Image: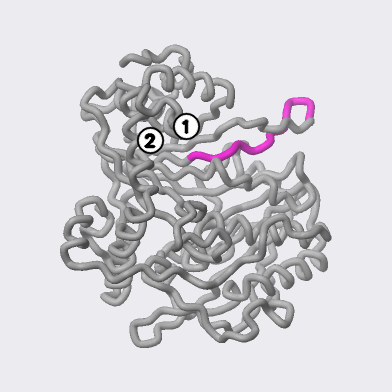
Amino acid sequence: MPTFFVQPAQPTALSDRYEVELPGYELWATMIQNVHILVGSLDVKEFSAALSRTLQLWPHTAGRLTDDGGRYKIYLTNDGVPVEFEERPHESTSSVVLDSHVIQSDLSGLLNSPHQRNALDFEVPLLRLKIVSFRDETTLGISWNHTLGDATAFFRFTHAFSQFYQGLHLVYPPPTFEKPVFPEPSECTIEELRPLMYHFHELYSEEELRKKYSERAHTSERVNWFFERHELETLCNSLRQRSPSAASRLSIHDSLSAYIVTVINRILPKQIRKIKVTDSYRFSGGSFAFPNVAGNAVIDALTALPENPADITGIATSIRETLTHYRQHDVISTWMSAASHLMLAAVKAGKSFYYPPSTEIMPVNSMAAIDWCSAHFGQPESHRHHMSGYGLLYLRIFGANPWRGDDGSWHAPEGRIDISIGVPQGCRQKVLDILAQGIDNIKIDG
């Protein structure tokens, strides 16, 4: 398949520098991969020009990882970013993307070199794109190395790309590249926090990690479901009335996560004991929080749940109280200092950390606050955004895509929430049956 390369327009935003430092907390050995679907075709000339301007503002995306004696950096090489092109004129996108849900089974054919498991590879581009031209639509696959930044940073890059493609001004401020430095933790601090960081309990080589991910794919099956905004608001308001200590603070996110826990607890022999919420401190206001940084600003908040597996109010309250604790500036600083230390130590040892699947821990990663569909490349009514990947009890939350009705017209999501979660083999239909009963049928008091 033909590939062309796009280089950053000059001078770049970092023309006075030759490298970007990567503290330990930036060393995520994973990729974030998105696929955007557009009606019709892309203007390749405008596409290339827009990408070049975007790379100019985000020049680290056109660089290369380097290990400078145990100090990891992105060397600003201004290399061309590869864009692979494929034509499938006799196929429809529906042969690959089966419905409007964000999470799909397999998008590998729509991505450029999608099978790279370890993102800490010094030889490959940090950003790769692929355009596939179908019969009536075009897909744009973007593979983003996690060392470039978290999902918010990736979204802002994509949004800028979309704006430039349309000939519009940027909506968000340009990225910054100064990274906060967290203090080196004491051994006492590391040992105190290590039990909460279960992904560091065992470290794996690249080959071992590949095997782990392969095994994980066979331990669960995916459930996708939509929730309307109004039903989640009703649930949240009901829980607030029953949780006086957290009445003004319970969020829709807390309520939805708690509801899913109670659903899963109805079909598992052992109840979920903990929830791990991936939370952002980007906008926390702390001295270490740089809102526009092209980097990672995330923390894992581990919540112990009430003994009653059906106590949805107690579960939601526990989540909110834990997030409130983890959002304190001193807690973030201490947690991040330990996490950064352990991530750097793992990379230096040639190992990677791993979140092992468990029927007692439900990881939650919500991107509902990120409006991916606003990066629509000029198609606000019909643009869709997709990702792949699921794991046992891994709850992923998104704003829903538009969908096409039987009459061919597009329908706006209007606050609809789209979730995906992996459930044990043989449990998928049971979960779907419970969800189909509706939120109104749950017992709020457990």
Q: Tell me the element at label 1.
A: loop
Relative image position of residue 406 (x, y in whole percent): 74, 26
Residue range highlighted in magenta: 397-408
Q: In the picture, residue 382 is in which quadrant?
A: top right
Residue position marked by numbered label 1 in the rendering: 251
Kindly tell me whether residue 256 is visible in this rendering. no
Tag shown at residue 320: 2
The correct choice, above or below, for 290 with respect to 315 in the image is below
344 displayed left or right of 429: left
Give the camera-side residue of 303 and 184.
Answer: 184
The residue under the point 32% across, 35% down is: 424
Q: Amino acid under label 1?
A: Ser
Residue 16 vertical placement versus 441 (above, below): below
Q: Is mark 2 on a helix, strand or loop?
A: helix
Does the CB distance between marks 1 and 2 fall below 8 Å?
Answer: yes
Is residue 17 or residue 377 the one in the foreground? 17
